Image (cartoon, grey):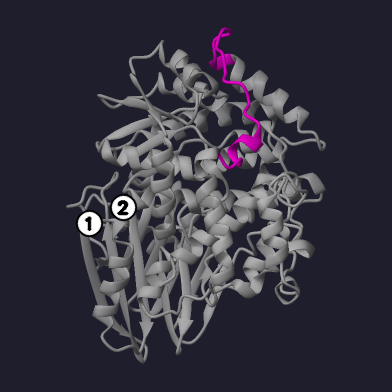
Amino acid sequence: MCGLSGIVGEVELMESLLRGMAEAQNHRGRECFRTWISSFVDARIGLAHNRMNTIDPVEASQQPFDDLDTGLVVMLDGEVFNYDDIRKLLASRYRFTTRGMCEVIAKAYDCWGDSCFDRFEGYFSIVIYNRWADDLLLCRDRFGVKPLYYATWRGNLFFASEIKALFAGGIRPLLSAERWASYLAYSTYGSPYETFWEGVHQLPSGFLLHYNGYSLIEKRWYEFEKRVALWREEASEYLSEFFLEQMHRSVGYSLMGDMMKGLSLNGTLESALYLALMKGERTPRHLKSYMHYRGKLHRSSVLWSAEMLSETPFPMEQVKITRSMLLKELDYLARWQEEPVDGLSTVTYSAFLRVMHKRGLSVLSGGWGLSHFLEGDSLPGDRFTPLVPSEVLSVDFRQLARKTEYRHLFDSEHNHLRCCELCYERIPHLLRSMDKMSMYYGIQTRNAFLNHNLIEIAFALTEGESGRNRRIWFANNIVAPLLPGGVRLAPAVEDVELYEIPVELKHWADESVLELRYGRVAGWFDFPRLEKAWKSMGSEIFADPVKAWKLLSLTLQLKSLP
């Protein structure tokens, strides 16, 4: 896990600006900080890198990594899990001087060009500068697990892993009124390029950006719908075999490296499968599981996780998230969050990561990812309802709201909506939030089942709108051979419990929302109606707690502004 930042253009005191950008995201890598500056067409290019050790040994390849053989300068945030396999493929053509990932990326890009990223397995944002061609490349992984943002100002290009680093480079921190209006009114997180800040763009997941000093050229390197179409041509027997192989491979990746690791379980089918698949892997010594809960222990899924672990050598620590921890975490969230915080589950998990940081963990592994694509049929708009703008938003602000429309990549409307959830809406937002939470506390989270092959096969297996055939196939071909018949899973938790504002946060929530009258966005609301509706929480407007968290997210965002 690392922090990437850079500037291309004619700017004064470039090294000082780069240092400020790196310091703004110093939590992404405190072990090493380096800069690299060179000429670029008629200007200069400066790269800065914050480094924290995960798989790749610190001494293997300092970043920015200048590969003299290929003329490429490389920076990486994330992990390319199969880098050693790729290194072996290239060994007959190139002489390697390090054991690190960055040299493998440099050689792979020199050999295969943009198509090299198809061979990478993992989560990554990559920056490659070709000194011989004066070409800058930015690349983001298939599902956007690792963020990468950019902005232009006075003809100069700025990019970084976090938006606050762009602000440190000189980009003005202005909330996007249009984006917030659309979020409050329609619950959308915007197009793949948008952020909640004026003039700041995100590189979409599965995209490349080339910059030659004069033009920005973006293109997709990962085409999800085409991959799904290829899987549909395969026999179901092969899909079962390959799916299981990929699950084993993913669990093995999640346990790689010699750093301090822990397991995060939740008593669900994913946790049970993860533990079953671990039996065939080389597990690290002193591995321990951590389970967090809020409220009553017997109402959480901790006891189910403890039962699953009883057949393993792994001890479990129960982490209770208290009222004081939640209140403290809300203050921390204002520092790192750069878009909405949707619900109490985000605050709770962030507090849990803070505890994991105190335990000295560098990596937290688990089996998250399957339920979103194999079991459930939650679609955009089913749960995350609008704020009813006609009631509490001002007339002028309401007119800025718009619904985001996406290209239909699938003929089935059901698959189209699921694709929107995966590629544009809730899941990319959750992944960005997860990355920023974990990086703030210096912990790399590895979601073993967020594997592109698994997700592609899950889509390929979908028949009809109910997803019934998908669940049956998964139960018969994957679950039954792996899990013992007596395994017990935690009962499903109603979504509403993840969003209800608990009694211990009610005073904070009341103060936060009513203070909007005196802040920078006072003109966005019809305050007489807003205050009346908020004070009578049982009213139709705020009967759904999801709507309340939208306003609370905005108040947290305002606290992060200088």
Q: Residues within 10 Å of mark 2 (few under 14, many from 20)?
A: many
Q: CA distance from mark 1 to mark 2?
A: 8 Å
> Is residue 225 at all visible to an observer of this figure?
no
Residue at 75% in and 48% down? 539
Does the residue at mark 1 contact the one at mark 2 (Cβ under 8 Å)? yes
Front-most of residues 185 and 243:
185
- Residue 278 image offset from top left, x and y in percent: 41, 23
**Left or right of 145: which side holds 528?**
right
Front-most of residues 334 and 137:
334
When the figure is inspected, residue 206 is found, relative to residue 315, above or below; the finding is below
Image quadrant where residue 520 sits: bottom right
Front-most of residues 97 and 199:
199
Q: Main secondary structure of the magenta part?
A: loop
> Is residue 167 at all visible to an observer of this figure?
yes
- Residue 160 image offset from top left, x and y in percent: 40, 68
Query: Residue farthest to the bottom?
Result: 42
What's drawn in magenta, residue-wise?
A: 481-502
Which SS class for mark 1?
A: loop
The amino acid beneath tag 1 is Ser
Numbered tag placed on residue 101 in the rendering: 2
Quarter of the image that includes the C terminus: bottom left
When the figure is inspected, residue 237 is found, relative to residue 60, above or below; the finding is above
Numbered tag placed on residue 146 in the rendering: none
Residue at 60% in and 58% down? 551
Which SS class for mark 2?
A: helix
Image quadrant where residue 138 sits: bottom left
When the figure is inspected, residue 395 is found, relative to residue 99, above or below; the finding is below
Count numbered badges in the picture: 2
